[in-house]
Amino acid sequence: MRKQVLLLALVAILLVGLITVLSLPTGEAAEKGETIVYVMGAEPHKLDPPNQVDNMSETVVRHIHDNLVMFDEKLNRVPGLATSWTVSKDQLTWTFKLRKGVKFHDGTPFNAAAVKYNLDRLTNPTKTTRRTALYAPFIKSVEVVDDYTIKIVSEKPFGPILAHFAHGAGGIVSPAALEKYGDDIALRPVGTGPYRFVEWVPGDHITLERNKEHWGGVPKVEKIVFKFVKEDASRVVMLETGEADLAIMLPPIEIPRLEKNPKIQVIKTGSIRVIYIGMNVQKKPFDNVKFRQALNYAVDKEAIVKNILRGMGSVADSALAPGTWGYSPTFKYKYDPARAKALLKEAGIPEGTKVKLWTPEGRYVADRAIAEAVQGYLSAIGLNVELRKWEWAAYLSTLAKKPEEAEQELFLLGWAPSTGDGDWVLRPLFHTDSFAPKVNNYTYYSNKKVDELIVLGMATADQKKRFEIYKEAQKLIMQDAPWVFLHNMDQTVGVKKGLKGVVVSPLELVLVRSASFK
Amino acid sequence: MKAKKGKSGQFSLIWASLRRNRLALFGGWTVVLFLAVALLAPQLAPKDPYRQDLASSLQSPNLTYPLGTDEFGRDILSRIIFGARISLLIGVVGVSLSLLAGIVFGMVAGFFGGIWDSLIMRAMDILLSFPSILLAIAIVSALGPGLVNVMFSVGVISVPIFARIIRGSVLSLKEREFVEAARSLGASHYRIILRHLLPNCFGPVIVLSSLRVATVIITASGLSFLGLGAQPPTPEWGAMLSHGRTYLRAAPWVATFPGLAIMVVVFGFNLLGDGLRDALDPYLRE
Amino acid sequence: MLKYTIRRLLALIPILLGVISLVFLMFQIIPGDPARLVAGEEASAAMVAALRLELGLEDPLYIQYIRYVGNVLRGNLGRSIRSGRPVTQEILARYPATVELAAASTLIMILLGVPAGILSATHRRTLIDNASVVVAIGGASMPVFWLGLMLMLLFSVWLGWFPATGKGGLAHLVLPSLTLGASSTAILARLTRSSLLEVIRADFVRTARAKGLPERLVVYKHSLKNALIPVITITGLQFGSLLGGAVLTETVFAWPGIGRLMVDSIAMRDFPVVQGAILLVAATFVLINLVVDLLYAWVDPRIRYG
């Protein structure tokens, strides 16, 4: 008897448990109605503008917050919470006129004091934010002129200042909420943006609801639900079954099929991310520019873009991607294995020379596959390439070593400047003072002329002059070939037909701030 | 398990039972077939499994490429043939590692008992209370992705299972007459373990090994799925399957054939293990 | 029995301490710096160093260890390095989903596995037996993520019967629990079969048969209930291990469970979350084992624990 009872009881317990769990409110909007289900590839880390550093967080943050200066689709700087700005003759004092009648989601009024509170927080030397480095170096003092005017004083002229205010970290947060929640503001953000925070169910979704009082007009869609779906194939399926209204980071191979689907619209645009294979130029034989150029000639970038990325990218012709401010095309190392071999000979590199090629997996679109293809090409010109795939965390800390301790030879990485400005590519990646582990110059590339140009560009507020300076720097870098220049990544977004107003920014951000269903 | 002294008699009994179990035989032959493929890979493979040709990437199965090509234009058939070596190696080496460690721990715990037993078995309990794939993930994260580290990690997760089963067998054997007899004749611990205990644990161990090879191959493919598997361009089936899943819709052959290869070989080991269990069990032997 | 229970519960303490120490050790060996990861790719070395200080990663190892154990004893699992959220919240947000999926998979395992095993045993060496073996073991021989993706393609995309991802109503549960339950179903079916075959040959069943009882009655009345003992054990153990999360299934179906949390946290080197989650999982596993053992003793009074 006991046994039957037990089995029955067991089944009954499981059933009851299941039913209970199922009948619990899931917190999800039951009625689909005017909700955008937005499917992203990872869960955001923190929703506090200056403390978020990942794209997913920034995406959500930019729906909840506004900046003084904002980027439009083409990365032009347009008025946001500041309606206009002027700069003094000596390029040291910036005056911002602020928008009137704006309120934070918690009812706190937006004014010059709120801006000062935020900027002080961004430059506070004792309690730094993750992005303090973007602001502290150029903001000397912040002054409230009147309720709707604020003055920012720098020590030196700073060229990319507007881009830094438009950066995701420059989202203005409610001072009252900051006082109230402290660091927990990252879990319950309060801004002035078109959508207000409702809930965050860890591991599952974040829900926002529209802010009817937004200065840009009433948002048309009632709710946005951000869902975190890591598996590429699953995001595609959700788009096809209609479970998602918008899915980002679609695998290139799926695009042609999705484009044929009458219910789906695929948006393809460029991004400012360059994918490259860095070379440790302090290490033999990579210290030889001929060898580095040989590698550039050896890899068929066109074929990689065509066959592996299925056209979702363009071959890089500069260290900057076309969407980046300051980009000018230089030239391409056209695929030419014969020339590569000749250069190897000139450089005195014997056949069968061993080189290490490192790559992460799952960090960039098709990263491992691209590295595998590059291995194939380099083997074809007679090098003995040892490919190694890394787990991201270990990869980062292995790359971040002093030049004399560095083990890397060839390493695949991508870079997208979060300010959208060329300065934020050239300075961290190519300046001598940026050698890893201090900053991100993992190639240990060092060229005096380039260093000078970078510094000069940073201190030039005249944007035309700055452009010319960066043009020169890009050319020098291309010639020196510290990278195997691969490609600029395209972004792919799948959208349910009828969803209008999706903004795909080259900063790898897909925003639905003012989207609507037809 | 009945431990009999006449081992050859037992073997023929098992064999007789196994021979009548058609599924188990099928499993056995599958395993043998794949072993043969692995050994003869260079002779069997029509093409170089590493040779890339981006121009002919993702071709569907045709006369030149019987199972099609992957995204690099490599011949999938040749990669599967060479991959047999890798996947079987992972299975066999992984299980051998855990078997060895399991024998040592299980024997010591069961034979010497006392503090040894408590210490070892508590340690095994701790390992066992970890979700096994997580333990494997942690180990590979620590050592870095790669074939050897994958073998090691899938080996570690099976250690407590082997240790337990061997300890159990030893405990029941220890008190039996033939062990007592050996002991009273003055045989050393070493000799008792090696000559009397070990051979008599053979039954359950062989069943478990066969089943674990299957599990280990599956677990290794899961590690590949999480980006922690064998290094590219190694033609490990799990890696081929998990990389190929990107093309599951547009070029299904890239993932499907390695997936089938895994499935068939794992199926073979499972059937074999299952049949062996039946054959070794006097109740089920018929 | 009570004494035994208490002793087993006390044994939980060294196991959990062992788990804590093991995870701690693991994070010393694993390369990669959580501060660097949460600081972002663009962060400078100075930023990373400041963060390490803030997170207490610069303290000597033994201090970190003592501090952690002390906090755990006070019921404080710390905060996630990644999100800054209390670890307890991170875990509790996911645990219901894990329990739901584990329960559903276990149910599937019982509903499919036991009947398949019985059929197999009563029709030994027939087509039915072989077919059940092939289906059961075949399902268990597919890599889980592949099975999951194929089920998703078949049932969500092509047939449109079930939603592909996420947690929600019953329909959301079907595919992930089938995927997760496949291999346990095979194990259970095989176990039911061999356990039943063993019992059928036992003396008391022979007696029943000799008394001339109909075969069906012999099987169901006399054999089955005895054969079920090991089945119950395995069911419990499988349930226990399913509660440890199902990384692959959760990833494919975007199921917000604890397995995914642990893997993501390992990747982010989010040490406090991994610690907390593994502690919970290990404790659950050990407790369920204990319950299974106790049930076992209750069902089979011949077994006594001292």
Image (spheres, coloured by chain):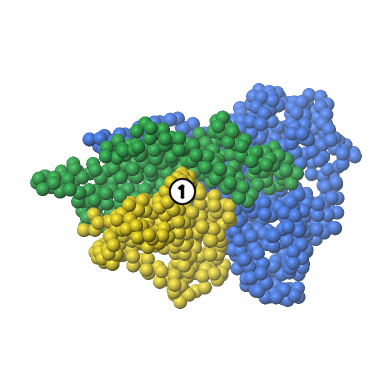
Which chain appears green?
C
Q: Which residue is mark 1?
A: B116
Residue drawn at (79%, 44%) of the image: A160
Q: Residue at x 87, y 41 (%)?
A: A156
Residue placed farthest to the right in the image? A90
Residue A45: name its quadrant: top right
**Is there any visible trace of residue B126 in the rendered image?**
yes
Is residue B241 toward the left or the right of residue A430 in the image? left
Residue type indicated by callout 1 = Trp
- Depth check: give the residue in front, C269 or B74: C269
Can you tell which chain is drawn yellow? B
- Please report the residue visible at 51 percent of the width from the left and 55 percent of the height from the top: B153
Q: Secondary structure at mark 1?
A: helix
The reply, left or right, for residue A224 in relation to residue B157 is: right
Location of the C terminus of chain A by quadrant is top right
Chain represented in blue: A
